[in-house]
Amino acid sequence: CTPIHKNMLSTGLRRAVRGTKVRGQIVAAARSRGIAVRAALMAPATSKIQFPAGKSQNKSMNLASPTQRFMSTEKRKFKKVMSCNRGEIAIRFARAASELGLQTANVYSKEDRHSLHRYKADQAFIVGRNKTAVGAYLDIEGIVKVAVENNVDAIHPGYGFLSENAVFAKHCKDNGIKFIGPDHDILAMFGDKTVARELAIKAGVPVIPGSEHAFESLAHAREYIEGKDGIGYPVMCKAAFGGGGRGMRVVRSSAELEENYLSAAREAESAFGNGSMFVERLVERPRHVEVQLIGDSHGNAVHLFERDCSIQRRHQKIVEIAPAIGIAQETREALWADALKMAKISGYNNAGTVEFLIDELGRHYFMEVNPRIQVEHTVTEEITGIDIVQTQIKIAEGMSLEEIGLTQDKIGYRGFAIQARVTTENPANNFAPDYGRLDVFRAGEGMGIRLDAAAGFTGAVVTPHYDSLLMKVTAHANTWELASVKLQRALGEFRVRGVSTNVPFVLNVLKHPEFMAQQAKTDFIEKWPDLFNFAESADRGSKILNYLAEVKVNGHPMPGADPTKKPSRLRPPMPLFE
């Protein structure tokens, strides 16, 4: 454990892992600054998982006696792996693992009992029977118990839910299950954005001016902004824990601070279980660019180039592009170098992304590290030909990047890829989520089009319990223009009936002159209200079919003569024949 780990993690872990018994044990160990924090994190917990009567107890469940199955560089070939996520990423993982010859398993909530991801693995297990729809996928004890009882070697967390949960990763380790992702201490480090920011400063990576620690109250935030040496407005209030664009608000004046700060804190508390906030100086009209990293447990790291994620609505990504467009080559190379600095100084292992903002002068600033697979990883896979999910599995098995064949000199890219997120939201109604049964579903396909979905078929039911992502559509071509045209064509072929989608809105984005000129920035959607001008689908075919079915089953709504009308007394003229 380096001095940087000691000094930063002792602070970061107290924040990032509080809230449970296991968290408390890690925090207590980390408070002693004379003890290596990595060692403190690896110290055993004391709780046990209780088996129902008659269940196998072949694997040790005593957290006070962690197994030595997986040392940091130990190699072990997995036999069975499991996803603890849902939807398209659970299917994506099952397919990748199956291609490696592994047995696969998925978990599902009672609300997801008819979901496709349940049937795409060799086995599926229900979790969280007595929990909420979301709570089922946050059930650390229940998920680990299922894995141990069914001889699972490793768990893949996907994105969202438990993907960045250091306590979950440590719980897996303590129970002899390999977490397919970064080590739990790395998750804890990057789980606190203020600790990650301090690490970037230590690594010599430029950061946005802002607070060094999370604020204890709104009053402290106001003093930091408006005080004698305050940074002034405008600022960005950001959640200290979490990501994905949640818990973020722009504040341009003192009058806006209270409402936006508290609103962001509430959103962060709801999404991440922690409402701690910090403040950064606002970078006006930036580009949002992220670098894909892969690190192994042998001290090696490579980048898989970058992605442009600037097309956002309320900090939620809508369209992603690889490689990034419209930026100077020297900026591009600086991003790669700084991302690798973050990987090296943290000892990063497995897949992750380093996110940056680029201002109007071309200067870049570190934002955060997302220590997990990203929704938009597909565009990087398409241009590099590298299966990132399979690479995650191999690294978790202990293979080095060189053994996998991923040294920087061997990694290149071809062409451009663009991903659009098709969601069940109504853009004409402030993107209100929609749910129901898909009466009709037809996706656009063809050469250069990749589809990732879990509910992409007629008869699928979109529930209100989870996020609104319906399908990821990725287009790949040799040029930026061809990739954009392919994606437009594919989305134009979509026919979805039964729920609203954002397809008309995304098509307007892709066809907009500023987007096609490669000049779109994070304010693109706010800047162009005409993106919301589109004709709603008439859905004539479904209406006719519904009418015919109604008549066939229930009869015509007005059989026979209309009793409300009197007979006509007109006497039509008769033709005369001579």
Image (cartoon, rainbow, N blue to C red):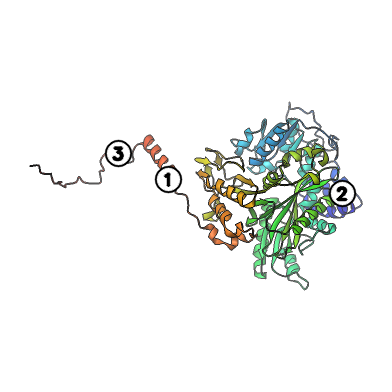
Q: Is residue 110 left or right of residue 276?
A: left
Identify which amino acid the numbered label 2 is placed on: Val
Q: Secondary structure at mark 2?
A: helix
Asked which quadrant contains residue 457, the reply is: top right
Residue furthest top as drawn: 54
Is residue 51 visible in the rendered image? The answer is no
Compute the Cα span from label 3 to label 1.
24 Å
Distance of mark 2 from mark 1, alpha carbons? 64 Å
Q: Earlier in the sequence, mark 2 or mark 3?
A: 2
What secondary structure is marked by label 3? loop
Q: CA distance from mark 2 to mark 3?
A: 81 Å
Q: Is residue 510 left or right of residue 148?
A: left
Of the two numbered discs 2 and 1 on the same chain, state the one appearing first in sequence.
2
Q: Measured along the vertical axis of the image, is residue 568 above or below residue 252? A: above
Give amino acid for label 3: Pro
Residue at the extreme right = 34
Q: Amino acid at mark 1?
A: Arg
Residue 470 horizontal side relative to residue 535, left or right: right
> Are the residues flagged by discs 2 and 3 in contact, CB closer than 8 Å?
no
Residue 124, quarter of picture: top right
Quick one: which residue is furthest to the left in this view?
Answer: 578
**How many circles with numbers are drawn on the protein?**
3
Residue 254 vs residue 103, the one in the foreground: 103
- The residue to which callout 3 is attached is 559
Which dot marks residue 540?
Answer: 1
Q: Quadrant of the C terminus?
A: top left
Q: Residues within 10 Å of mark 1 (few under 14, many from 20)?
A: few
Q: Secondary structure at mark 1?
A: helix
Residue 204 lies, with reference to residue 86, above or below; the image says: below
Q: Which mark is residue 190?
A: none
Q: What is the crowding at mark 3: few (fewer than 14 residues within 10 Å), some, or many (at least 20)? A: few
Q: Which residue is mark 2?
A: 37
